[in-house]
Amino acid sequence: MSWIALLLIGFGLADLGHALRPVRHLPEGAAAVVAVLLGLLAGLTSWRDLVALLVIAALTVAWGWSVRRGFGTGRAALPLAVLVGSLVLAAATTPWAGAAGGPLGHWLRATPLPVLHGASTDRALLLLGGLLVQGSTGNVLVRLVLLATHTVNPARAQARNPGPALKGGRLLGPMERLVILGLGLAGDYTAAGIVVAAKGLLRYPELQAARERAADHSGPPIAAVTEYFLVGSFVSWLIALTTLVLVGR
């Protein structure tokens, strides 16, 4: 699983870099270097592993480039194809990955941190990749799916003089996914379900207000608002749940 973990780390760091400092080519290039260095620190130095590290670096750069191009052209097919193809390739070839260990493995055995002490190198890398994906990569995937399904924000689409864009969702989405993932890893699936239900309850007043605006024709149709909310929410939850299945307990 080490190759999958390094791929997730590369993608997660590339998207995080773009979110923090959107400099052309720099975030994905730096993320590719970090992924390769982590692989070397994990003792992945056989010829197969070295080839895989180069491929992971190339895919990380391709991901950053395709996301930027996809958002720029309004087409989500290219970045989604890069993502799916990369994950399929990593999953198909991961049985050939060498045993991870190296200096990183020695550090994991010696660290006093309870969460990491004694954890295998593969699991530690996979956990790191899973956590990174919950951040900016999760936001990117939600936007790509909304773009691919032509599910635009109806409020923005009909607003003639839109106010300043609220960016809280860019932080709340990752926080929500991290909470779900953390509770799932802790085995508290009931609490994770409560988080999902709570989001629906908190959104209910907003949907009710949208229904009233739609009734007097001062706002977008309630069906469009509901669809936008449901598509974005379900994609966000699926990212956390898929990561939970991949990382395991």
Image: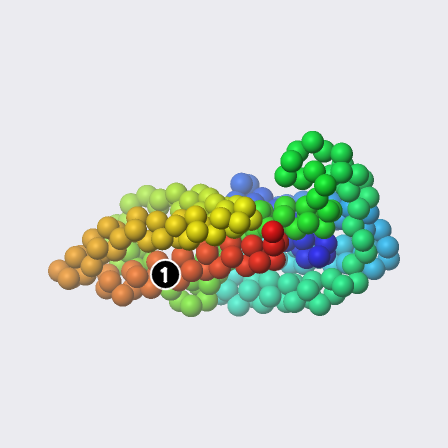
The colour scheme used to paint the residues is rainbow
Q: In which quadrant of the rendered view does residue 91 lie? A: bottom right
Q: Position of residue 212 (x, y in %)?
A: 16, 57
Going 42% across and 60% down the picture, which residue do you hit? 234
Q: Secondary structure at mark 1?
A: helix
- Closer to us: 180 or 129: 180
In the rendered image, is residue 162 in sight? yes
Q: Residue at left 81%, top 56%?
A: 98
Tell me where residue 208 sits by quadrant.
Answer: bottom left
**Looking at the picture, which amino acid does disc 1 mark?**
Leu
Q: Residue at x 81, y 53 (%)?
A: 99
Which of 70 and 14 lies nearest the eye of the viewer? 14
User: Which residue is nearer to you in this view: 189 or 104?
Assistant: 189
Q: Does 133 sit left or right of 148 as displayed?
A: right
Image quarter in which the N terminus is found: bottom right
Residue denoted by label 1: 230
> Relative to residue 51, is residue 20 depicted above or below?
above
- Toward the right, the furthest residue is 47
Left or right for 236, reference 200? right
Q: Can residue 218 be seen from the camera position used here?
A: no
Q: In the rendered view, does 234 fall on the left or right side of 80?
A: left
At label 1, counting other C-alpha atoms closer than 10 Å, the crowd grade (few under 14, some 14-19, many 20 or more) is: few
**Image location (x, y in percent) of residue 111:** 72, 33
Q: Position of residue 206 (x, y in %)?
A: 25, 51
Please tell me in which quadrant of the rendered image residue 7 appears.
bottom right
From this viewpoint, which residue is outermost toward the top? 112
Q: Position of residue 37 (x, y in %)?
A: 76, 44
